[in-house]
Amino acid sequence: MAEPLISLRDVSRVYRRGADDVHALEHVSLTIESGLFVALMGPSGSGKSTLLNLLSGIDRPSGGDVVVAGKRLNDLSEDELAHWRSRHIGLIFQFYNLIPVLSALENVELPLLLTSFDRRERLQRARTALDVVGLGARARHVPSELSGGEQQRVAIARAIVTDPDLIIADEPTGDLDAKNADQILRMLLELSHELQKTVVMVTHDPRASEWVDLVFHLEKGILKDTFAGAAGKDHVEPRGPAAGTPA
Amino acid sequence: MKYLPLVFRNLLRNKLRSLLTGGAIGLAMLLVCFFLTMPGGIDRLLSEISSNVRVSVHNKGGVVYDMPYAYVQRVRSIPGVAAVNGEVWFGGAFEEEAMVTFPSFALDPDAVQAMWPDYKIEPIALEKFRRQRDAAIVGRETMKKYGWRIGQQVSLVSTVWPVTLTFRIVGEIPNDRAPHFWIQREYLAQAMQAQDRDLDTVGTIWVRVDDPAMVPSVMARAVEMFRNSPAEVTAETEKSFFASFFGSLQAFVQIILVVTALVALCVLCIAANTASMAVRERSREIAVLRAIGFSRGVIFGTLVAESMVLATVAGGTGALLTYGFSALIRMLAGGSMGSNELGPLTGFLVTPGIVAQGIGLSIVVGLVAGIAPAWGAARRPVAEILREVF
């Protein structure tokens, strides 16, 4: 059996807040195979975003091991993590977070600035990514000239333009109406199923389970449940709560 | 280079703020460069009009005290001396102004070329200066100031001697910063004799030494020659002489330099404040860039580059505008060197060196102003920033 793309073993994350320790994640263990569309769900403060930050190498665990795309992230420095993210991770945020002074095309080009591609190659790849999300005709528009749904599609194009192994989406539909939210979820599903990208998404949207292969449910920093989504592929074998319970 | 478009777009994000900050930096650099022209005026003047092989021998009590005219011949006998010319302060006041507005001296016309070959006075002018008793050679600066021309007659009232003499200008010293008005010593002597008075003194004895290595020994011999005489002398090189002459301006120059430094510090604070605001306002974007893989070095570099580009463009523009500004001030002042108490400080001559200093200072201001906020934004862990801004 092939190595899972993501493997968390007994991962904890503790923050200091004043004199107190805040246990954002406690002894979480899980694995995610390549090409799955996965949702992290749970109430506010359950540790979803913390888990997302750990998977994407934005944060480091207080304990346990985080291995993504064959790399153990615990040991990497800030700059090593940044370099690793630029190669392996595509990020999508709730509020799109495009650079307002750059056009859609330039926003999508941003992650490619960190590569060795020349300008012509960068722009060609950025245009292709915009075409993938159906915004090729809006390439010259700045974010303020785009709707919320369009901005999020630009953000998706920015996330996929480097052809990352893993796409991380933090409540990508949280700021969209139902119609645009469905478009975004469909797009993420297509990225996963047609382009074989692994997509991990934090969401509060209960309908998300209809779109994903697998759902991890967290509460108070603990992985409470794992179950298959409605879009689950045949090979997906949901792991029960035991996989995420404290070791 | 590939990050430059991002730098420029960010600079143009808040156009009014960039314009105002740039305006402040540009204005400050204009002032800095303008102030720097003032102390620079003394240095340039000394370089232009003085030489290290010319020595001034004058009364130990000060240049305002005379020496016997016989000293000139005795100094000429010192080994190593190539030429000697004794000059007397005429103190001529142009009738229209009734005050001394340029330095006028009576001297030996036969020893002018030997003493000041670097002044490059036309041979024909020197010849006329030798032949015509009422001839005068005038520095170009004074010629320009009064609109005089060669061949013109000018009357000067001496503020030292009881005479009013009329001169015919026969040539000029071809240097824009030469204010001199030279007349024949013999002309003044005859005018004094007409009043039954002898002109038997000299104010300064100028000496040109053949070999620069012999200058110290010539000066020592001159001092030694008149030791214990009624009029003891001191000797110094021409550069040193003029530097002492302008010594009273040095304190003012120091004040100018302090003010210049304060202006630079002030603009540094303005630029740093702008850079800090720009970083604060863009915390979210910086967090996103960090999250998608921009390293701390790239973030730091682009933020510092923003500050440096703004400061360099604005400061460079201000520095270049000093050319026009100083010309305007010169025009408004209606004169130049020697036109008032500040003498050579008011030349306001902008040199490429001064502009280069202004541009260099602008780059430093941009660099220093950008470092602190850029470092603050770059060094914080990305997870910490994301928690704050999302």
Image (tube, coloured by chain):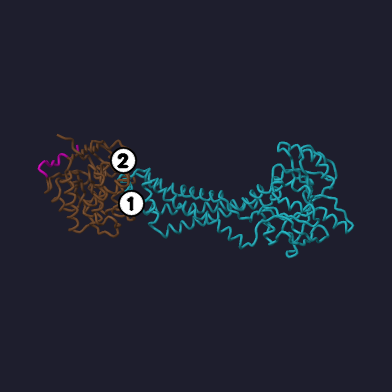
Chain colours: A brown, B cyan
Q: Chain of mark 2?
A: A
Mark 2 Cα shell of 10 Å, populated few (<14), some (14-19), many (≥20): many
Residue at the extreme bottom of the image, as rendered? B96
Residue at the extreme right of the image, as rendered? B196
Q: CA distance from mark 2 to mark 1?
A: 18 Å
Q: Position of residue A85 (x, y in %)?
A: 28, 42
Q: Amino acid at mark 2?
A: His
A68 magenta-colored: no
Q: Position of residue A38 (x, y in %)?
A: 17, 46
To which residue does mark 1 refer?
B285
- Between B242 and A220, the one nearer to me in the picture: B242
Q: Position of residue B108 (x, y in %)?
A: 79, 50
- The answer to whether B237 is drawn above or below residue A206 in the figure is above
Q: Is residue A98 visible?
A: yes
- Between B85 and B297, the one nearer to me in the picture: B85
- Between B197 and B269, the one nearer to me in the picture: B197
Q: Amino acid at mark 1?
A: Glu
* Secondary structure found at label 1: helix
Q: Main secondary structure of the magenta part?
A: loop
* Secondary structure found at label 2: helix
Query: Based on the displayed image, in which of its 4 quarters is residue B16 positioned?
Result: bottom left
To which residue does mark 2 refer?
A83
Q: Where are the magenta residues, as a range?
A: A233-247
Mark 1 Cα shell of 10 Å, populated few (<14), some (14-19), many (≥20): some
Residue at horizontal 66%, vertical 48%?
B48
Residue at the extreme left of the image, as rendered? A234
